[in-house]
Amino acid sequence: MLVAFIAALIFRPDPSSVTADFDYSSMPVLGDPNAPVKIVEYGDYQCPSCRNFNLSIKPDLVKNDIDTGKAAIYFQDLVILDGNGIEDSNRMALAAHSIYHQDKDSFWKFNDAIYREQGEEKTGWATTDVIVNLAKSENLPIDYDKLRSDIENKTYQSEVDASNAKADKLGVQSTPSFFINGKLYNGNYTYNDIHQAIETASKGE
């Protein structure tokens, strides 16, 4: 067993050396799917750094890069902050998948709302009732009973698991992590630095 564990560590891929191949058509997308620059965010809805990106950096990306057709952003789950019987991150991911399958445009409204209302880690705050009531408060045009059922029955657990498995295969272990046109972004998490990476990617570099 020890040998297998050591081998797993040795052969874990270095994300910076990997060019990821994504099925973009299967992911929630914000912006024009035909945009020349595709950004994939791996996020955990319980992650404070993800919240900071969503509230402080993404608005400028939307205004200057996404709404202009230069880039599109895609979202993938990387549930890493659950534990000790707490499933806040996974429950929110299940809800996001349910909403996405009901109404794709509502996904991003929920994405923004859940980060805005993010509670403390590993407290169990993200109950099914809290999540469903948040969706109602945002007036999402979805079936709220189905949302509740999808969360409680873990309807889309296989999709959440597949996203986590993809991240693991790519060697991604932290959130948020970004791939820009398939290449791991290693820069600072500021708008100017990410914007520059977008500019570089748009030139095929």
Image (tube, rainbow, N blue to C red):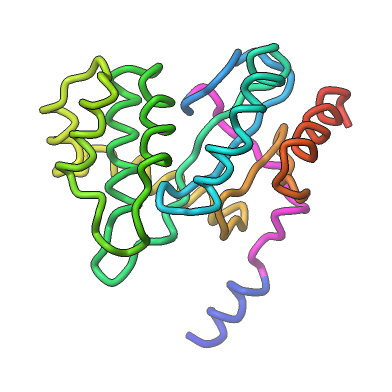
Camera-side residue of 117 and 24 = 117
Q: Quadrant of residue 142?
A: top left
- In the rendered image of this protein, does residue 55 appear above or below residue 6? above
The structure residue drawn at horizontal position 52% and vertical position 23%, both measured from the top left corner, is 29
Marker count (numbered): 0
Q: Does the stretch in magenta take in 61?
A: no
The structure residue drawn at horizontal position 56% and vertical position 26%, both measured from the top left corner, is 24
Q: Quadrant of residue 125?
A: bottom left
Q: Main secondary structure of the magenta part?
A: loop
Q: Does the stretch in magenta take in 17?
A: yes
Q: Quadrant of residue 70?
A: top right
- Magenta segment boundaries in residue numbering: 11-25
x%, y% of residue 195? 77, 31
- In the rendered image of this protein, does residue 150 appear above or below residue 186? above
Camera-side residue of 132 and 95 = 132
Camera-side residue of 100 and 62 = 62
